[in-house]
Image (cartoon, coloured by chain):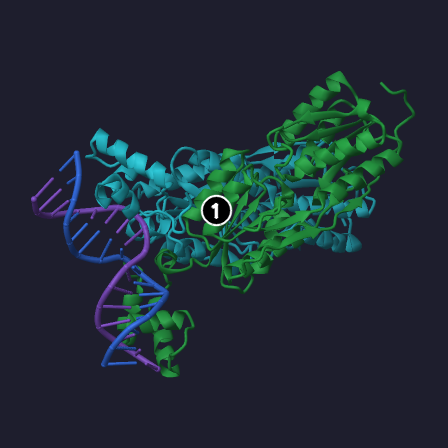
Chain colours: A cyan, B green, C purple, D blue
Amino acid sequence: MTQARAATIEDVAREAGVSRAAVSKVIRNAYGVSPSMRERVNAAIAALDYRPRVAARAMRGSSFTLGIELPHIGNPFFAKIIAGATAALQGTGYQLIIAPADVDGEEGVRAIGALADRQVDGIVAISPLVSPEWLERLAARVPVVMLGRHDRSTAYDTVTGDDLEGTRLVMEHLFELGHRRIVHLTRSEEVTRPGSGNPHAIRLEGYLTHMRAAGLEECIRVVRTGLDEESARLDTLALLDEEVPTAIFVGNDELAMGTLRALSEYHLTAEQVSVVGYDDVDIASYPAISLTSVNQAGEAMGERAVRLLLERVQGRTEPIHFSVEPSLKVRGSTRAAPAEPTP
Amino acid sequence: MTQARAATIEDVAREAGVSRAAVSKVIRNAYGVSPSMRERVNAAIAALDYRPRVAARAMRGSSFTLGIELPHIGNPFFAKIIAGATAALQGTGYQLIIAPADVDGEEGVRAIGALADRQVDGIVAISPLVSPEWLERLAARVPVVMLGRHDRSTAYDTVTGDDLEGTRLVMEHLFELGHRRIVHLTRSEEVTRPGSGNPHAIRLEGYLTHMRAAGLEECIRVVRTGLDEESARLDTLALLDEEVPTAIFVGNDELAMGTLRALSEYHLTAEQVSVVGYDDVDIASYPAISLTSVNQAGEAMGERAVRLLLERVQGRTEPIHFSVEPSLKVRGSTRAAPAEPTP
DNA sequence: TTGAAAGCGCTAACAA
DNA sequence: TTGTTAGCGCTTTCAA
């Protein structure tokens, strides 16, 4: 029996011979419903194949929806985060929706705004290019958890990897292998603006600090690129046209894949140029790739972010800033560079 | 000036000294608004930082939101589809939201239902395990475009790759290289149920047909696996324990990566076992991987799906079934198998 | 061209 | 325990 119009709470009430309020109580598992009424209502719901309109519920309270803003779907590290988030949501009655941003800057703000306009009960966002003030205004209206952002607001929670520590692991590893001419390939200046709290900003800062501390100020070289593998490939190619360093520390694994591709186009092997990435995405451990990388437990981060968000949705207001410990996965490709004179 | 409560259309109307209806007309660009009124209203909107609540709008009409159901975010082919979909939505005023499913069967249905409950104006779904009847019931309430599904309903549009042709390319390629013992690694029997319209069902069917047509009925071997790289790795390992074929045709590239991993754990090289995948994800062309694969233009598919959906949202009712031509990307790793006796 | 008013489907006081 | 009722913030006739 197909009806043209989907059943409403009114239809269910009529079918069950009760009031709308009664139906509402049943679907919300609220107090004060007799077993017999519950039974009749549930029967009517089943008979009419009734499903509450989320929009209508949202107007009065919650939408039972959590939103996550995602820059660049192509990055497999984000897939891990989503997997963790989805797992944490199992059985909670909340639905996760993803708003893809896919470009720098404005886009992230747009996507987050779109989520807010859609009345989600909470938002997880991945370190968008936006001021703390903007985020605090947002957080005043809807619970917010920021992923990867290193500032500490009282208005929102954060879940971050310890990027300073991760970078230390990378740099010490490279130093131990004898590298001096280490290039850092990272995102745009806008993304790494000091104080932006962006992970790439911290990694860059760590790179600079360690190079200086090692007396390698002269060797510092920062190359900028976009947010996907292809732009990393292109910018690495441009770098190699000018100079072939002995090691490249790349801002994340997706970009590192582009670097590896460029190196192979240049017929440079892992013995000649060591590459280290960040995130330890699945492909990094692939035998033919063997990319040394910093692991930072994406699933755990996604899971934690959702848990924190649910707590906020349920009323917590004191901020929590959670940090996960990174570890370096050293893989075969990284070899000691041959002795060489300083440039 | 932060206000505790977000501005409503009422607030804007009061600020501008007009009626709610007038404001509504302005934000919808409706007819019959004088320039002066438009100006005053826009000023008020800006002053109050007003943003219409999507939930409230959805109750009366549309939510300006398109939803896409995505099984398994980890698959990079889906990322391409999203990229295409996002591109097609630029400047339309519609927002894309993704509902991740991440498991077989029930989950896809749940995710699609969640989108429908959230009053999206249209749904793109990726060949979920669901009957045409179920889809037709869904399509009666909200415009639907199915990706990768080979059935032809009048109730919804479809965008598919020509999987029969793609499979033909694969099998002929392998035959030409002299392969006979070709194993097909594919998804569960549930997924490949004949008549399910699932791409994997078609690919399996094509595999069987070509093997028989080549007089290799004896050599047919179908191995089942889950939906991610890891399960493919495990199931390939189990296969290799029993038998080492000369070629493996894997249902898609993500699974193929698991197969390649298993082969390398077994110390089998590309000369010994040829692997062919499907989708031609970016990593397949990576030099150290060189996975032969069927390319099927994911971006174009996502873009087309969204265009079709927008047409339906705007009123089209005649169904359109769009098919993209696949092409085989032959990469180095696939070599002729050594001559061998039939098992 | 503008505004008044009804109502979309639901929840939450409050009464009965 | 149950039902009545007043909205939530919008859009949309329909009059003015």
Left or right position of A342 against B233? right
**Which of B71 and A124 lies nearest the eye of the viewer?**
B71
Quadrant of residue B219 within the rendered picture: top right
Residue A119 place in picture, x, y as percent:
37, 52
* Vertical relation: A202 (above or below) B343: below
Quadrant of residue A214 within the rendered picture: top right
Residue A311 place in picture, x, y as percent:
34, 39
Residue at 35% over, 50% down: A142
Q: Chain of mark 1?
A: B
Task: Kindly identify the amino acid type of the residue bearing the numbered disc 1.
Answer: Leu
Left or right position of A257 against B17? right
Q: Which residue, as the protein is rendered here, is positioned at the far front?
A: A1
Q: Which residue position is annotated with label 1?
A: B138
Give the quarter of the figure containing the C terminus of chain B.
Answer: top right
* Vertical relation: B303 (above or below) B211: below
Q: Which residue, as the protein is rendered here, is positioned at the far right?
A: B339
Q: At numbered mark 1, what does the secondary structure look like: helix, strand or loop?
A: helix
**Which of B45 and A271 lies nearest the eye of the viewer?**
B45
Give the quarter of the figure containing the N terminus of chain B.
Answer: bottom left
